[in-house]
C-alpha cells in the first residue's frame, strides 16, 4: 500500500514532481559544479601563477659571489663553480617530480659580435628553449618557452640542437639586425631566428642554445644556474622548521609535503654539488595570492551551497503545501500522522536521489565546461563525490520538507478537505 | 457636465478605489503572515546573495591587485645608457604617484672588501624597501636615519644589511669590516642579514645617505610599485616617462602579465559562480512566489466573481509582487553588503567597499523575478472560470 501510494503519487502528479525535481536538480547541479571548482581552483591558479616565472633556483654549492647590477652579471664567466648538465634530467626524478612544471638551465658567457667590422662585447646566455629531456622512460619538454611566458619572440624560436640564436630587442636595434640575418659570435657563424622582448636584462643579450654557450666558454656540459618552476604548497610554520632538527616520521611528513623548502632540498640532493633555494619574491607571494583566491572561492561555495539548499527547501515546501487536501483525505481515511509523514518523506527522498544523480551529472559537465573555457584545462570530479552529493541532497531535501510536512499533517482534515486554511 | 463636476466625480470614484486597493494589499500580507513572510524571506536571501556576489565581483580586482603589489615593483626607472638618475627624480616619481603606490631608489656600485674581493654595494632607503620588497627575509633592519648615531660612528661603523651569501666572505661573527671604493674606505657593521634567493643575497645594503656621501654616486634605478588596474599603471608609466626624460621607464612584464592572467581567471571564475548562485536564488524566489500566488487562487476567484476587471487583478498582483520585490531587495541589499564586508574581512583582511551602484541592479532584478512569478500563474488562471476555483476543483 505504501509503495503504491508513493508510486501513484509520482505517476499522477507529474507536473508537481517535475517542478520540485527540477529545483533539486538545479540545486545539486550548482552545488556539484561549485564544489568541483572549489576543490580544483588551487591547482588551477597555481598553474596560472607559474606565469610569474621560476620559484626555485639551483646554484653551485661553492660559488663565488654574484656581481649583478641591473640584471647584468659583472663577474667573469669563468669564475666560480659550475653545475653539470648531465644532472638535469634527475630533476624529474625527485619525489615531487610531478610538481615540476618546467626548468631552464642558464649559462651566461661573454662573447664578441662583429658589427660593421668592429668587435662588440655582449653577454650571451645559453639555455634550453624547448628541449626534450628524458628521465627513465619518461619524456619531458622544458625550457624558456614554458618557463617564461612573458618572453615575446618576433620571428621563430631557435632549435635547441642548432646554432641559431635569439637576440634581445635593444641589442638588435643597436646592431640593426633582423631575423634571418647571420652574425659572427666569437668567431662562429649563427643565424638570428628571432628578436626577443622581455622587458628585462635579456633585451640587451644574445640568447643561444646551451651547447653554443658551453662551446664559447670551452666547458662542455657546464651550466651556471637552473631555474625551476614547481607547484608548491603555501609555506606555513611547519615548513619553516629546519629539516635537520626533525626526526623520523615528522621529517618524512615535512619531506613529503610540497613546500618550497622541501622541493629545494630534493633538488639539492638531485644535483651534485648544488644548492637550491626558493626565489622568495615568487615563492612567498604565490602562497599569499593562492590562499586568498582559495579562501574566496571556498566562501562563495558556501554561499552557493546555502542558496541551493534554500531553493530546494522552498520548492519542497511549496510542493507539499499544495497537497493539503490529499493529507486531509488520508487522515480522514484513518491514516496516522506517522503514516502520512512517512509517505511524504519517502517521496522526498526518492526525488532527492533522482534529482541528485541527474544534478551531479549536469554539475560535472558544467564544472568541466568552466575548466575548459576559463582555464583551458580539465576540472576533474572524483566519483567519490557522488555519494557525498547524494547524501547532502537527501538531507537538504528532507530538512527542507520537514517543516511543511509537519504543518501539513497537523491540519484538521475537515478544514483541509474543505480547502480552508 | 462641467469640468469641475467631472473632476469631482472622478476624484470620488478614485478615492475609495485607491484606498481599497491599498487595503487589499496590506490585508493580503497581514492575513497570511506565514506565507508572506516566507516569500519575503526568500526574496531577502536571494537579494542578499546577489548583492554580495556582485559586490565581491566588482571589488575582488582591487583586493587582488593589492595582494599582487606584494610582488614588488611593476615599473622600473633606469638612467638612460647606465647613467645615474638626476637629483630629485625620487620627488618627481612621488609626486607622479600621488600616494597610489610606492617607489624606492637603488644606487649600485662594485666595492672591494679588505682582501680585494669585488662585491656589490647598494644604497637604499630602508623604510621604502621594507614596504616595497616585502618578501625580503631580513633578520634585523638597520636603524633608520639617526642624527646622533651618524655623528658618533667612529667605533661602530655605518650599519649595513648583508646578503646571506656575502656574509661569510666579509664578516665572521658579525664583526665590523671595511669596504673600499675608488681609494676611499667605509667602516661598516652588519646590523642584520637579508635572504631572497636572488641577486640580493650577494650584496651589501647601506643607507642611501651614507651611500651618496661616501661614493658621490646618485641612484641609478628607481623601482616603482604603482597600484591600480593595468590601465592605471600604464597611465602612471606614461606620466613618469614624460616627467623624467633622463630615465628609461620600463614595465616589469613578468609581474604585470602574471597579475593580469591570474586576475582575469579569478574574475571569470567568480562571474561563473555568481551567475550560478544568482540563478539558484532567483529560482528559489520563483518557486516560493509561484506557490504563494497559486495558493491564493480563491482570492483571485472571489475578486473576479465580484466583478474585478482583468486589468485590476493584474495590477493588484503586480503591485503586490513589486512591493515584495522592492522590500526584499532593500533589506537583502543591506544584508548582502554585510556578507560581502565579512568575506572581505575574513579573507582579505580589508572590508569590501559597499557599491551603491549594485542596488539598482539588485532592485530591478528582484522586481523582474517577482513580477514574473506573480504574472505567470495569473495568466494561467485567467482562463479558468471563478466558479470552478471556488468549488475547489
Image: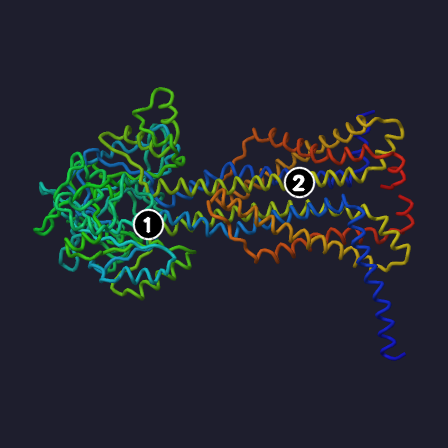
- At x 30% / y 30%, what residue is drawn? A265
Q: Quadrant of residue A143?
A: top left
Compared across the picture, whether A68 is left or right of B259 comes to left
**Does the residue at mark 1 contact the one at mark 2 (Cβ under 8 Å)?**
no
Q: Does B4 appear above or below B330? A: below
The quadrant where residue A60 appears = top left
The chain letter for the residue carrying disc 1 is: B
Left or right of A417, for residue A241: left
Considering every residue shown, the one lying at the far bottom of the view is B2
SS assignment at label 2: helix
- Where B318 sits versus B390, above or below? below
| Spot occupied by residue B289 in the image (x, y as percentages of width and height) | 74, 47
The location of residue A402, given as percent across then percent down, is 73, 33
At mark 1, the secondary structure is helix
Q: Nearer the viewer, mark 1 or mark 2?
A: 1
Which residue is farthest left? Answer: B183
Mark 1 vs mark 2: tell me if same chain: no
Question: Where the N terminus of chain B falls, by quadrant?
Answer: bottom right
Chain letter for mark 2: A
Q: Badge 2: how crowded within 10 Å, few (<14), some, or many (20+)? A: many
Instruction: Kindly identify the residue that appears in the image at 42 percent across and 40 percent down.
Output: A46
Viewer-proximal residue among B335 and A51: B335
The residue that mark 2 highlights is A310
Which residue is label 1 attached to? Answer: B132
**Which quarter of the image is occupied by the C terminus of chain B?**
top right
Where does residue B201 sit, x and y in percent of width and height?
24, 41
The residue shown at (37%, 38%) is A101
Q: CA distance from mark 1 to mark 2?
A: 46 Å
Q: How many residues crowd mark 1 within 10 Å: few (<14), some (14–19), many (20+)?
A: many
Compared to B348, does A6 lie above or below?
Answer: above
Amino acid at each position: 500500500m505504501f509503495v503504491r501510494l508513493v508510486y501513484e503519487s509520482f505517476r499522477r502528479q507529474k507536473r508537481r514532481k517535475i517542478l520540485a525535481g527540477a529545483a533539486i536538480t538545479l540545486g545539486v547541479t550548482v552545488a556539484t559544479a561549485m564544489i568541483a571548482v572549489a576543490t580544483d581552483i588551487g591547482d588551477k591558479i597555481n598553474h596560472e601563477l607559474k606565469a610569474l616565472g621560476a620559484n626555485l633556483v639551483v646554484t653551485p654549492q661553492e660559488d663565488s659571489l654574484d656581481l649583478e647590477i641591473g640584471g647584468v652579471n659583472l663577474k667573469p664567466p669563468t669564475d666560480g663553480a659550475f653545475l653539470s648538465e648531465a644532472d638535469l634530467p634527475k630533476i624529474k626524478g625527485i619525489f615531487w617530480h610531478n610538481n615540476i612544471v618546467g626548468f631552464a638551465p642558464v649559462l651566461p658567457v661573454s662573447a664578441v659580435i662583429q658589427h660593421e667590422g668592429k668587435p662588440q662585447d655582449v653577454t650571451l646566455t645559453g639555455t634550453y628553449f624547448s628541449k626534450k629531456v628524458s628521465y627513465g622512460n619518461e619524456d619531458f619538454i622544458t625550457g624558456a618557452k614554458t618557463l617564461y611566458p612573458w618572453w615575446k619572440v618576433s620571428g621563430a624560436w631557435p632549435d635547441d640542437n642548432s646554432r641559431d640564436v635569439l637576440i634581445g630587442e635593444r641589442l638588435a636595434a643597436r646592431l640593426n639586425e633582423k631575423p634571418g640575418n647571420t652574425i659572427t659570435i666569437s668567431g662562429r657563424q649563427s643565424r638570428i631566428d628571432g628578436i626577443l622582448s622581455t622587458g628585462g636584462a635579456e633585451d640587451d643579450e644574445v640568447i643561444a642554445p646551451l651547447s653554443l654557450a658551453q662551446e664559447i666558454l670551452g666547458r662542455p656540459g657546464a651550466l651556471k644556474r637552473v631555474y625551476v618552476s614547481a607547484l608548491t604548497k603555501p609555506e606555513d610554520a611547519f615548513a619553516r622548521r629546519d629539516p635537520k632538527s626533525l626526526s623520523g616520521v615528522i621529517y618524512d611528513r615535512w619531506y613529503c609535503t610540497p613546500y618550497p623548502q622541501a622541493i629545494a632540498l630534493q633538488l639539492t640532493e638531485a644535483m651534485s654539488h648544488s644548492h637550491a633555494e626558493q626565489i622568495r619574491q615568487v615563492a612567498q607571494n604565490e602562497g599569499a595570492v593562492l590562499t586568498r583566491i582559495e579562501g574566496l572561492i571556498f566562501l562563495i561555495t558556501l554561499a552557493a551551497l546555502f542558496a541551493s539548499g534554500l531553493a530546494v527547501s522552498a520548492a519542497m515546501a511549496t510542493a507539499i503545501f499544495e497537497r493539503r487536501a490529499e493529507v486531509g483525505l488520508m487522515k480522514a481515511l484513518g491514516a496516522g500522522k506517522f503514516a502520512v509523514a512517512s509517505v511524504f518523506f519517502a517521496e522526498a527522498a526518492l526525488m532527492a536521489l533522482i534529482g541528485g544523480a541527474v544534478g551531479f551529472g549536469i554539475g560535472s559537465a558544467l564544472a568541466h565546461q568552466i575548466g575548459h573555457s576559463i582555464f583551458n584545462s580539465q576540472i576533474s570530479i572524483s566519483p567519490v563525490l557522488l555519494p557525498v552529493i547524494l547524501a547532502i541532497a537527501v538531507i537538504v531535501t528532507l530538512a527542507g520538507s520537514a517543516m511543511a510536512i509537519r504543518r501539513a499533517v497537523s491540519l484538521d482534515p475537515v478544514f483541509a478537505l474543505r480547502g480552508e486554511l | 457636465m462641467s469640468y469641475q463636476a467631472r473632476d469631482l466625480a472622478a476624484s470620488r470614484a478614485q478615492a475609495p478605489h485607491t484606498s481599497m486597493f491599498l487595503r487589499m494589499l496590506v490585508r493580503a500580507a497581514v492575513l497570511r503572515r506565514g506565507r508572506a513572510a516566507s516569500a519575503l524571506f526568500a526574496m531577502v536571501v536571494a537579494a542578499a546573495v546577489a548583492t554580495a556576489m556582485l559586490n565581491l565581483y566588482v571589488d575582488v580586482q582591487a583586493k587582488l591587485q593589492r595582494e599582487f603589489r606584494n610582488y614588488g615593483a611593476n615599473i622600473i626607472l633606469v638612467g638612460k645608457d647606465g647613467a645615474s638618475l638626476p637629483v630629485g627624480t625620487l620627488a618627481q616619481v612621488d609626486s607622479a604617484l600621488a600616494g597610489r603606490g610606492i617607489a624606492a631608489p637603488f644606487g649600485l656600485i662594485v666595492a672591494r672588501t679588505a682582501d680585494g674581493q669585488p662585491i656589490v654595494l647598494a644604497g637604499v632607503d630602508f623604510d621604502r624597501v621594507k614596504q616595497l620588497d616585502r618578501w625580503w627575509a631580513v633578520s634585523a633592519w638597520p636603524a633608520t636615519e639617526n642624527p646622533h648615531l651618524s655623528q658618533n660612528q667612529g667605533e661602530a661603523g655605518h650599519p649595513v644589511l648583508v646578503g646571506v651569501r656575502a656574509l661569510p666572505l666579509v664578516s665572521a661573527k658579525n664583526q665590523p669590516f671595511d669596504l673600499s671604493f675608488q681609494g676611499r674606505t667605509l667602516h661598516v657593521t652588519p646590523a642584520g642579514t637579508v635572504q631572497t634567493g636572488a641577486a640580493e643575497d650577494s650584496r651589501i645594503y647601506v643607507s642611501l645617505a651614507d651611500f651618496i656621501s661616501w661614493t658621490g654616486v646618485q641612484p641609478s634605478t628607481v623601482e616603482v610599485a604603482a597600484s591600480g588596474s593595468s590601465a592605471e599603471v600604464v597611465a602612471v608609466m606614461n606620466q613618469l616617462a614624460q616627467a623624467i626624460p633622463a630615465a628609461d621607464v620600463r614595465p616589469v612584464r613578468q609581474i604585470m602579465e602574471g597579475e593580469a592572467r591570474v586576475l582575469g581567471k579569478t574574475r571569470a571564475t567568480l562571474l561563473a559562480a555568481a551567475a550560478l548562485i544568482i540563478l539558484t536564488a532567483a529560482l528559489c524566489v520563483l518557486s516560493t512566489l509561484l506557490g504563494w500566488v497559486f495558493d491564493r487562487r480563491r482570492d483571485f476567484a472571489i475578486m473576479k466573481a465580484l466583478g474585478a476587471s482583468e486589468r485590476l487583478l493584474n495590477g493588484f498582483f503586480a503591485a503586490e509582487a513589486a512591493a515584495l520585490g522592492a522590500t526584499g531587495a532593500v533589506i537583502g541589499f543591506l544584508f548582502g553588503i554585510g556578507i560581502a564586508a565579512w568575506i572581505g574581512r575574513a579573507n582579505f583582511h580589508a572590508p569590501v567597499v559597499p557599491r551603491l551602484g549594485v542596488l539598482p541592479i539588485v532592485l530591478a532584478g528582484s522586481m523582474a523575478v517577482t513580477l514574473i512569478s506573480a504574472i505567470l500563474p495569473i495568466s494561467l488562471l485567467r482562463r479558468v472560470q471563478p466558479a470552478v476555483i471556488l468549488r475547489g476543483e
